[in-house]
Image: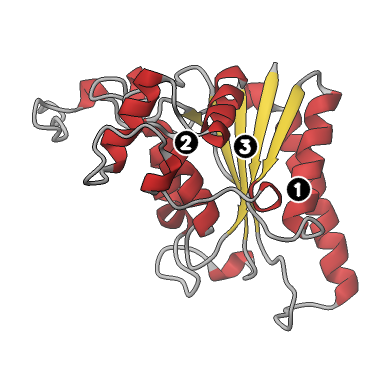
Amino acid sequence: MHAHIVHAHPDPSSYNGALTQGARQSLLDIGYSTTVNDLYRTGFDPVERATHYRDRADAEAFAALREQRHAWENGTLPSEVKAEIEHLKRANLVILQFPLWWHGPPAILKGWMDRVFVNGGLYTSRKRYDTGHFRGTRAIVSVTTGAPERAFGLGSRGGDFQTMLWPIQYSLHYMGFSVLPPFISFGVQGHGYRYEDDASLHKRLERNLSAWRSYLGALDAAEPIPFPSWGDWDDDGRAIAAPDR
């Protein structure tokens, strides 16, 4: 079994760093091999642009989907994209580790998805959702936030976490992944924003790290998040209404 962790935090000594290292060690302990791509450390360019493609399908106008498909078909994808695709193909489990910034993932992680989920290769018009390239591969979103857990929920000040995570988790589903419930680390405080004293914070975050390790140690019991699939839509992509009872 192999796990690939995509880490998206600029400070390796951060709590996100501790979560990534904890995940890696926990997975090694239960027999996984692991790879980690620290996107900031490796300097991953999140911006899809024409200069990434040395053999252009159209030298006059840049259309990302067309160039991705052309590069896939001709074996000319950028080296950093090819390397990530190989990690994903090898993986039985993919973890995305990141802080919640402005109610979503950091730009570098969104850009990783823009560039690595290659059109024509990893998805096509019919190779999506439950027929996606990565069907059978599990994925977990592990995310940190500064506000305490009680601040989140429908109508609450922090917003609804399931709504904020829906775009990234649905995109994973689009690619065929079986998306397991997210692991959310609340109240990761620092830099002047504090809701408790240092001793209490340290103990709580240590308990949280232990809970993360326990989650990873019991993956076989985790049920994927239910998402709609091809059989749930009509030919126009609309939800098929449940029959009258």
Task: Tell which tag, 3 or 2, sits nearer the viewer.
Answer: 2
Give the x, y percent position of residue 38: 69, 46
Give the x, y percent position of residue 78: 50, 34
Give yes or no for contact between labels 3 and 1 (Cβ–Cβ under 8 Å): no
Whichever of labels 3 and 1 marks the residue nearer the N terminus, that label is 1
* Residue 169 visible to the viewer: no
Amino acid type shown at disc 2: Val
Amino acid type shown at disc 1: Leu
* Residue 46 visible to the viewer: yes
Say which element carries label 3: strand
The image shows residue 70, relative to residue 105, as above or below, that is above
The image shows residue 123, relative to residue 148, as above or below, that is above
Residue tagged by mark 2? 116
Task: Tell which tag, 2 or 1, sits nearer the viewer.
Answer: 2
Local crowd size for mark 2, using a 10 Å CA cut-off: few (<14), some (14–19), many (≥20): many
Amino acid type shown at disc 3: Ile
- Image quadrant where residue 5 sits: top right
Whichever of labels 3 and 2 marks the residue nearer the N terminus, that label is 3
Q: Nearer the viewer, residue 149 or 93?
A: 93
Residue 19 badge? 1
Give yes or no for contact between labels 2 and 1 (Cβ–Cβ under 8 Å): no
Q: Nearer the viewer, residue 206 or 103?
A: 103
Spatial CA span between label 3 and label 1 = 11 Å
Quadrant location of the N terminus in the rendered image? top right
The type of colouring in the image is secondary structure
At horizontal 82% and vertical 68% (from top left) the residue drawn is 201
Say which element carries label 1: helix
Residue tagged by mark 3? 95
Whichever of labels 2 and 1 marks the residue nearer the N terminus, that label is 1
Say which element carries label 2: helix
Give the x, y percent position of residue 145: 62, 63
At horizontal 71% and vertical 36% (from top left) the residue drawn is 36
